[in-house]
Structure formats: structure tokens, C-alpha cells
Amino acid sequence: MTDDNNNTNAKTILWWGRFDKDYSRNRIIRQQMRQLGCRIMDFHPRISMLGDIEARLRGMARPDFVWVPCFRQRDINAASRWSRSRGVPLVFDPLISAWDKQVFERHKFTAESKAAARLLQQEKKQFHKADILIADTREHAGFFCDTFHIDSERIHVVPVGAEESLFTSEPIPASRTGPIEVLFYGSFISLQGPQVIIDAARLCTDSSIQWRLLGKGPLLESCKAAAQDLDNCSFEDWIDYLALPQRIHSADILLGIFGATDKPGRVIPNKVYQALACARPVITRCSTAYPDPITDGEQSGVFQVPTDNPQALADAVIRLADSREQIIEAGLNARNTYDIYFSNALIKEKLQSVLTATNTQAE
């Protein structure tokens, strides 16, 4: 167990599970918790399902509440047993549903299969063990309510945001010349819809617009094969996370996700938050996960296109690339959208509400 804050008067939060504290969601949440004066303790059990036994053997001190971070469904049962025995609230920030991912994204099970039904019931029980559930968007909050029958009052929406010390606002220089660069980066999975980007690049015959795809993943090779005859489309190897902001700053237009399943309509991906923070306009698929005012692309810097529609994507890129002045203005609006709806300051405000709710749960 580690302690990364020596403030002995602060509210103590026990981060529980075999999590990656350097994952961007976790880093941002932890940064803002510290800004609120919280004392963070880390507990990484050797075996997830036996974590409560290990915690008792270690004689861990009682925290103000337990926080199980994203993707750690496997740690919930043990964390719940230990937190109940100590009379402290349990908060879970799943970020995704394992059932949703395995059935509708990875297609490991069919929705009607017994295996899928078991996974759904298992995850429903896991989610119900949390006193407070964190969702990244309002659509995910609604999904948790409808799918796992969670009381909406127990769900707090905390956006993912971006690490603002890295992803800084750097408007496009008015002096920039050369081709308009359209950048996608990601892990080349179906949720992101990289094939749609290749098809859109094929429909975009303007040689002054260049499409760049950065990263690696399952669909990379098929995308390369589909684009091998395109002069306006190229691929780049994945780069270090710390170099990503500079790469974004060198581009003109950023691309989000274009997958056709339900999940992409519930999430706002990291790349969108990061691009907006860097003052770059984003083109992405339509989604009700965005706050209602983010509808007009020119005003918000977020241009939404119909799902799985290469022609719509190509048309949106061509319209936005009509002039650099238009791109620059859209980029400035993008950063404004970020500051209003997704900033670290807003995340801190949302986390303060969670802290207040845990006080109520503990009483």
C-alpha cells in the first residue's frame, strides 16, 4: 500500500484494485482529488478476489471511502466486503460495461447466449455493490440505470477531460501553409470505425487535403490494404503519450470515432477531449453523449456526422477545409467548448459533489 499525499488532515480515499494509476482517466481524477485536498492511499491486492483478506491481514487503516477505478470490475466484490466491514462508502468508476464490451464490441458472446446472460447478471451485482457509481457521460449514466437497474440518484457524471498540463491550447498559426492535415489516432478497433475514414479519404479528391492515421491495432493491416492506392492517405506508427500533444498541434483537423454500434453513441473518447483542449476542431459521429448545446459545429468546434457514413465525413472535411481562417476559428471555439463542459475545473467541481455524497452515505 502506498500513500502519495502527506496531508494528514485531508479526507482519505483508498484507491483499491489492480489498476493503472497512469491511465489518463485515473491520472486526471487523482490530480483533481489532490486539488481538493484529499489524501490518496493505494492498495493493489495480489489477488483481486481475495483483496479483503489481504487488506485485513495488513491491518489497513479506515479511510473516508473506497474508490475502485475504471475497468476494475474484478476488484469490486472484495472491496465491497472490506468497506462494509469498516462502515465506509464504496465508489466505483467503471468507465465501461464489461458485458457491453464482450457482447456488442468484441462479439465474444451473442446477446441471447447463456454466457452473456451470466455476465450481465454478474456485472449487475457488481454495480449494485457500489454506494455511488461514476459515469463519464449522461448517456452512460442512462445506460447504467436502464441495463443494471441502478437508481439514478446514486450515479454521478464526471467527464473524462484531458490532462491540461500536457494538452495545452495552441491555436493554429495564421501563417501556416501547405496541405490541410486531417489526423486520426487510435487503436484501430471497430468502435473507432477506421475503415470509415479510409472510405472517406477515397471520396475526398482534393489533393490539398491529406489524411493521416496514427496508431496500431486489430484493423490496422486491413485499413492499410484498403488505402494502398490512395495518395492522400498515409499511416504513422504509434508515438509516446508525452509526444501526442505536439502531434495534435501540428495537425489542422482531428477525427473522433465513427463506429456503428450503440456504445460509440454513449461515449466521448479521450481523443476528442484532447483535441478540443489543444484548440483543434473535431469531426466525429453523431452522439447524444455530448451536452445539448454542442450541436452547431461552427460554434462548438465539434462537427457531428451520421454514423458509418464515409460520404458525410468526406463532405464535412471538405467544407471545414475550405479555408484556414475557418479552421482556426473552429479551433478556438473547440477550446471554448472544452473549457465550458469538460475542463479539469469542472471535473473538480463534480468530484466535490461525490465527496459530499460520500459524507451523506457515511452518516
Image (cartoon, helix red, strand yellow):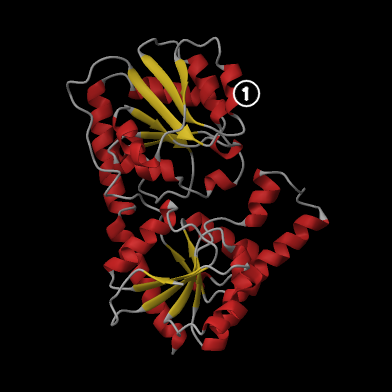
What type is the residue that disc 1 sits on? Ser
Visible residue check, residue 309: no
Of 91 and 117, the residue lying toward us? 91
117 left or right, relative to 324: right
Residue for point 44% across, 58% down: 21
Of 22 and 232, the residue lying toward us? 22
8 left or right, relative to 313: left
Q: Which residue is mark 1?
A: 222
Of 343 and 68, the residue lying toward us? 68
Residue 244 on image: x %, y %: 36, 37
Visible residue check, residue 51: yes
Residue for point 63% across, 68% down: 47
- Looking at the rendered image, the quarter that the C terminus falls into is bottom left
In the displayed structure, 42 sits above or below 265; it is below
Instruction: Rate crowding at label 1 as few (under 14), some (14 to 19) or many (20 or more) other CA atoms within 10 Å.
Output: few
Q: Which residue is outermost to the right?
A: 114
In the displayed structure, 152 sits above or below 357; it is above
Q: Kindly indicate the quadrant of the structure image that contains residue 119.
A: bottom right
Residue 143 on image: x %, y %: 58, 58
Residue 51 on image: x %, y %: 60, 74
Which element type, helix, strand or loop, lies under badge 1? helix
In the displayed structure, 175 sits above or below 73; it is above
Q: Which residue is outermost to the bottom?
A: 363
Q: Kindly indicate the quadrant of the structure image that contains residue 261.
A: top right
